Image: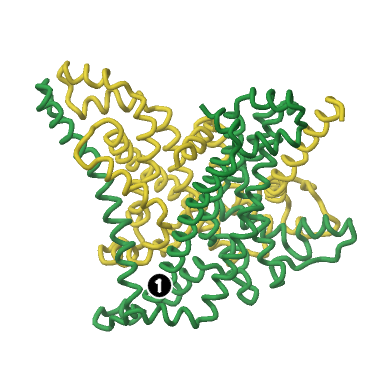
Amino acid sequence: MPGPSDALEPSTGRKHVAVAGRLFVAPALIAIAIFFLVPVVAALGLSLTDFDIYALADRRNLRFVGWANYGTLLTDPLFWTALRNTAIFVIAAAPLSIAVSLGAALLVDAKLARFRGLFRTALFLPVVTTLIAAAVVWRYLYHPRVGLLNRVLAWFGVAPIDWLGDPTWALPAIILMAVWKNFGFNMVIFVAGLQSIPPRLYEAASIDGAGAWQGFRHVTLPMLAPTFAFVAVMTMIGHFQLFAEPYVMTQGGPANSTLSVVLLTYLEGFRWWNLGYAAAISFVLFAVILVLTVVATRLRALGGGLDAPEAARGGRA
Amino acid sequence: MSRSARAIAVNAALVLAAGLTLLPLAWMVSVSLMPTGEASRLPLRLLPSAPTLEHYRTLFTRLDVAGYAANSALLATAVTAISLVLNSMAGYAFAKLPFRGRDALFRTLLAALVIPAQVGMLPLFLMLKGMGLINTYAGVVIPGLASIFGIFLVRQYAQSIPDSLLDAARIDGAGELRIYRSFVLPACTPILTTLALFTFMGTWNDFLWPLIVLSDQDRFTLPVALANLLGEHAQDVELMMAGSVLTVAPMVVLFLALQRYYVAGVVSGSVKG
């Protein structure tokens, strides 16, 4: 491929670099604009129409309905169920997964630990497994009669639980599976965070008479605060997008107890072809994620300023 | 607690945690090798009485799993190759080729990271339907052509390329495309490996979009085919586990071979996120 190849004067050189820069970003930005940003804006437009299977067949059946889809949403029990389930999933699974990640990171990073690399790999493995395959496997682990979980629980005298068939247990079962699948990701981030804490902070703390717990409370936690903030926001956003687990394991049941917002969007949009209504649902989800992200970022800015002890902050050169 | 007692406690906890984590995967492999029906029988067996490959044979001969694997491999390779070129060019330019409005453009791009991919899905589907790309491989590839996260990763890495090196090449008369190919790409090999790994695995593992776009069974990717298989063979535990093994195994192998790059990517994505 021939390129502009003359050595140039400094001023024309800068201009030529600028031209090259624009040309270099263009393909990626055009792709992102056409196939991501335009559809997002179009989704807002779509959510203001009654686009359904008739409009899919013939665009003349398409009508502009203003905010009517959003009005319908507010009175749609299915939407509220999906939002409630998704909220429970986020509120339970995200902190649980972060706590497990932190625990695993502390163990893997412990000075006394042996074969750290091996353990880290083992704990990380669920992250790279295909979600659909993992969901299929867990579907059988949760089988009421022959599933491994109930068989193991039977040794302890626990009566069989119909994990995925009982509205009380189905969502917790999906939460447990999601924690297993995801915790390794944040564990790796926490390990990197732990390794960036200067050892002299722990030495200083122990000279001041701090025990292991106090060292954790006053050095580790404050030093991990920025990592925490990042991990919390990203984990939350990820968990709002729950879809494949209920799709494979429960199809949203029983009694809609595992119906998530994205699953409802999929069903409304691609199963029942109510694309206008589905677009409204996806926009509400986007708004919720956006608001929470902004709040979390603000809280982090606020908390970062108040919480971190001076010693810890000074240590972060 | 004495030091040795603590060492035992830490390592015992690690063994327990790793065991629990690997248990579902080990169980998947073990059941996939059991004769039909053995996983459902009582008492519980953890290992097959007589290991058999019959379910793998069924998958390959009767259920065309090789075809699905080929679809998955083809799509993952295509997305990886195209997006690697587009992301690396853009990431390099955002790091090293200043033009007016560049940094504002990059900030806008980063802000768009907060938009969940599902929001644009419905109009994208209609758009591709209008272009006749529904139920085609191209339709699956299109949303993955370029990624904001990929551009971000490359930009972060390319910033460490010394300007003097690029300027020297320019004085020697090298064109920008040549500089990109002969200096920038080699210098960015580690991050490009990471990005290739992320993209390949992400595309291979993706479910929602191929599920929406593909309707012909011959074009299904492995995850879509696996979910479809569950519809007809839900009772056949051993067969479903063999299918899961085949879907997961390439990712596990790839990860084990290149895990250094994978972990580096996870961490560097979180540093300035």
- Residue drawn at point x = 80 percent, y = 35 percent: B12
Left or right placement of residue B129 versus residue A5 in this view: right
Residue nearest the viewer, comparing A199 with A47: A199
Residue A114 seen? no
Q: Position of residue B86 (x, y in %)?
A: 30, 41
Q: Please tell me how crowded label 1 is: few (under 14), some (14-19), or many (20+) other residues with Cα within 10 Å.
A: many
Say which element carries label 1: helix
In the rendered image, residue B143, in percent from the top left (x then y), is placed at 35, 53
Chain of the residue under label 1: A
The quarter of the picture where residue B80 lies is top left
The picture quadrant where one finds residue A92 is bottom right
Q: Which residue is drawn at 39% across and 70% down?
A: A279
Instruction: In this rendered view, identify the residue nearer to me: A122 or B109.
Output: B109
Residue A120 percent coordinates (x, y):
65, 34
Q: Residue at x 61, y 38 (%)?
A: A222
Q: The yellow chain is which one?
A: B
Please state if B75 lies on the left or on the right of B237 as rendered.
left
Image vertical order of residue B179 relative to residue A245, above or below: above
Instruction: Kindly tell me whether residue B53 is visible in this rendering.
Output: yes
Asked whether A34 or B66 is in front, the reply is A34
The image position of residue B14, as x and y in percent, is 75, 36
Chosen colour scheme: by chain
**Quick one: which chain is green?**
A
The residue shown at (81%, 51%) is B45
Residue in front for this viewpoint, B257 or A236: A236
Give the position of the N terminus of chain B as an image quadrant. Answer: top right
What amino acid is at disc 1? Ala
Reading the image, the residue beneath label 1 is: A280
